[in-house]
Image: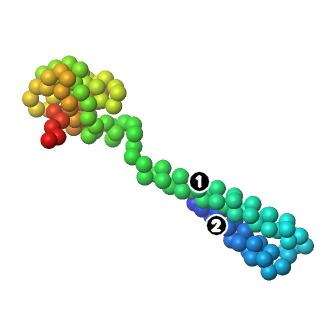
Amino acid sequence: MHAWLALIAGILIVIGGVLIFSASIGMSYLGIALSVQAILAITLLIVAGIAAWLFYVGVKAQYRRIKTGKEAIIGASGITTTDLNPNGEVRVLGEFWQATAKEAPIFKGQQIQVMDMEGMFLIVKPAEQKA
């Protein structure tokens, strides 16, 4: 899809450029009036600009960070809603999850960081305190 947008934008830019250049030197294609030719060229360039912008937005979306699933939750931080000794409940990214403490017990209200995910359980550790 993106390749087609780029191709269309490129073709429209070339045609629009040729039409503007020929209108500026007074040469007419297919008997079209120079004013109509200039308007057609400007319209083609505007459509090419829109196609190029859509191409840019599409390519930019390909490099955006994943916002769902296991990839998004691993590394996220949250807070415990119950004591984790070793199992309990945490809130991560606005959702409540069952979790298992990786190391020592973690008490209610502490900041945690998600290390891994096993099924529907999160493996967490206490978040590192920023000094």
Question: Dot 2: what SS?
Answer: helix
| Residue 107 percent coordinates (x, y) | 14, 23
With respect to residue 66, does 77 lie above or below?
above
The vertical placement of 13 against 126, above or below, is below
Q: Is residue 97 left or right of residue 51?
A: left
Dot 2 corresponds to which residue?
A: 10
Give the position of the C terminus as an image quadrant.
top left
**Residue drawn 23% across and 20% down?**
81
Residue at the image point whose x is 58% and y is 60% from the top: 3
Compared across the picture, whether 68 is left or right of 55 comes to left
In the displayed orientation, state which residue is furthest to the top: 82
Residue density around tag 2, few if under 14, some if 14–19, many if 20 or more, within 10 Å: some
- State the residue in front, 71 or 14: 14
Indicate how the structure is coloured in the image. rainbow
Is residue 47 visible to us here? Answer: yes
**Residue 34: x percent and y percent?**
85, 71
The residue under label 1 is which amino acid type?
A: Leu
Q: Position of residue 37 (x, y in %)?
A: 82, 68
Q: Quarter of the image holding residue 53?
A: bottom right
Which residue type carries mark 2?
A: Gly
Residue 63, which numbered label? none
User: If the image is split into quadrants, where does the N terminus sit?
Assistant: bottom right
Name the outermost residue toward the left. 104
Give the camera-side residue of 75 and 25.
Answer: 25
Residue at the spot of label 1: 54
Q: Are marks 2 and 1 in contact (CB under 8 Å)?
A: no
Q: Would you place residue 16 above or below residue 60 in this image? A: below
